[in-house]
Image: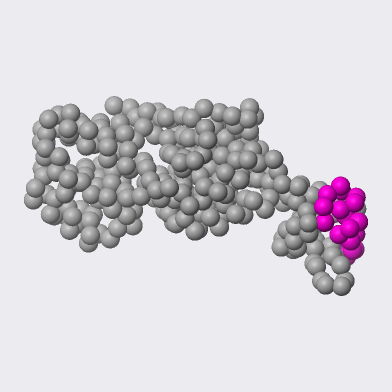
């Protein structure tokens, strides 16, 4: 359910656009507005605060509420995309693909980077509470950990905002729509490929804090186990996506004294080329960004949609 104060704010904004309340005119009093729109004075105050925050009206003690501007920025056709990072090629491709599908269906996107920080993510999610948006596509910050923003996500879901979770959804979200690659089998297939090539001692680097990397790690380790090989725990490392080249090189140097080969699950974690590193050669048959956009559109149309796992080609 959309909160009453959001609905009232939208109605007042529409009335301003239609010149029911022209620029420079005074709005009716809180009591009059409450009576006219059939809501409480508390609801009126919350709606007026949003209009004031957006610069549509000014509120001065003793002089009432004055209309300052018209705003036709209807957010109903806007989909917010929240990603931990926008710098790597995969993220840029994701945004471009999702946007292309949404634009073709008459929607626009607002894209933000959370830097994998809970608080930055929270600030953006709180903005969605102040308007009626068309949807949210989110790759949650620190997705391997319990989300500190589950309270806001649950509020948005109660409003029936279409939400697509990329790769995984936080614990506590009932029946989420999740679109993801098959990360477990990516890790498994890459380890099997190296083993089949003749390598028997394997190391690897994964991105810390991401559920997708944790799944790939599980697959990689399981493939080593299934082959009856020794798992060198000290040579399987989680690192930050922005880890320094010095740190990566140091790990690679030490690991290659023990193992035959090191696989990196992310192109940002390959060092400067001093030490050989293998990266994923697998391709997917579908675009993650496009599948997320299609899932959101289906959810808007039908009220629900099934989660999707995109396999890798082997």
Relative to 58, 24 lies left or right? right
> Which quadrant would residue 30 be assigned to in this image?
bottom right
Give the answer, above or below, for where 254 lies relative to 2.
below
Q: In x, y percent, where is residue 285?
A: 40, 28
Identify the residue at horizontal 28%, vertical 53% (top origin): 239
Residue 85 visible somewhere in the drawing: no
Location of the N terminus by quadrant is top right
Q: In x, y percent, where is residue 203?
A: 17, 44
Residue 229 visible somewhere in the drawing: yes
Relative to 224, 267 lies left or right? right
Based on the picture, tell me whether residue 35 belongs to the magenta stretch: yes
**Highlighted magenta segment, given as a residue range:** 22-41
Identify the residue at horizontal 32%, vertical 50% (top origin): 208
Relative to 254, 112 lies left or right? right
Based on the picture, tell me whether residue 265 belongs to the magenta stretch: no
In depth, the one of 214 and 84 nearer the eye is 214
Identify the residue at horizontal 70%, vertical 43% (top origin): 2
In depth, the one of 122 and 203 nearer the eye is 122
Location of the C terminus by quadrant is top left
Q: In x, y percent, where is residue 78?
A: 64, 45
Identify the residue at horizontal 49%, vertical 58% (top origin): 119
């Amino acid at each position: 359910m959309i909160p009453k104060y959001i609905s009232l704010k939208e109605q007042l904004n529409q009335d301003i656009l239609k010149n029911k309340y022209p620029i420079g005119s005074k709005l009716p009093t809180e009591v009059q507005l409450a009576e006219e729109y059939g809501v409480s004075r508390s609801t009126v105050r919350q709606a007026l605060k949003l209009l004031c925050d957006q610069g549509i009206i000014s509120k001065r003690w003793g002089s009432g509420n004055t209309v300052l501007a018209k705003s036709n920025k209807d957010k109903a056709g806007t989909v917010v995309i929240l990603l931990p990072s926008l710098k790597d090629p995969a993220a840029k491709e994701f945004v471009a693909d999702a946007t292309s599908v949404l634009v073709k269906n008459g929607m626009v996107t607002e894209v933000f980077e959370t830097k994998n920080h809970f608080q930055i993510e929270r600030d953006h999610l709180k903005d969605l509470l102040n308007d009626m948006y068309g949807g949210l596509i989110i790759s949650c910050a620190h997705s391997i950990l319990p989300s500190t923003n589950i309270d806001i996500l649950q509020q948005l879901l109660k409003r029936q905002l279409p939400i697509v979770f990329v790769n995984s959804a936080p614990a506590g979200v009932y029946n989420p729509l999740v679109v993801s690659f098959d990360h477990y089998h990516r890790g498994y297939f890459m380890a099997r490929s190296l083993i089949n090539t003749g390598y028997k001692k394997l190391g690897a680097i994964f991105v810390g804090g991401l559920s997708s990397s944790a799944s790939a790690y599980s697959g990689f380790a399981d493939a080593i186990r299934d082959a009856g090989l020794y798992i060198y725990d000290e040579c399987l490392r989680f690192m930050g996506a922005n880890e320094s080249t010095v740190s990566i090189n140091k790990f690679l140097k030490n690991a290659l004294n023990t193992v035959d080969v090191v696989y990196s699950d992310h192109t940002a974690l390959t060092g400067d080329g001093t030490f050989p590193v293998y990266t994923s050669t697998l391709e997917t048959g579908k675009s993650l960004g496009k599948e997320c956009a299609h899932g959101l559109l289906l959810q808007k149309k039908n009220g629900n949609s099934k989660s999707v796992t995109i396999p890798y080609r082997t």
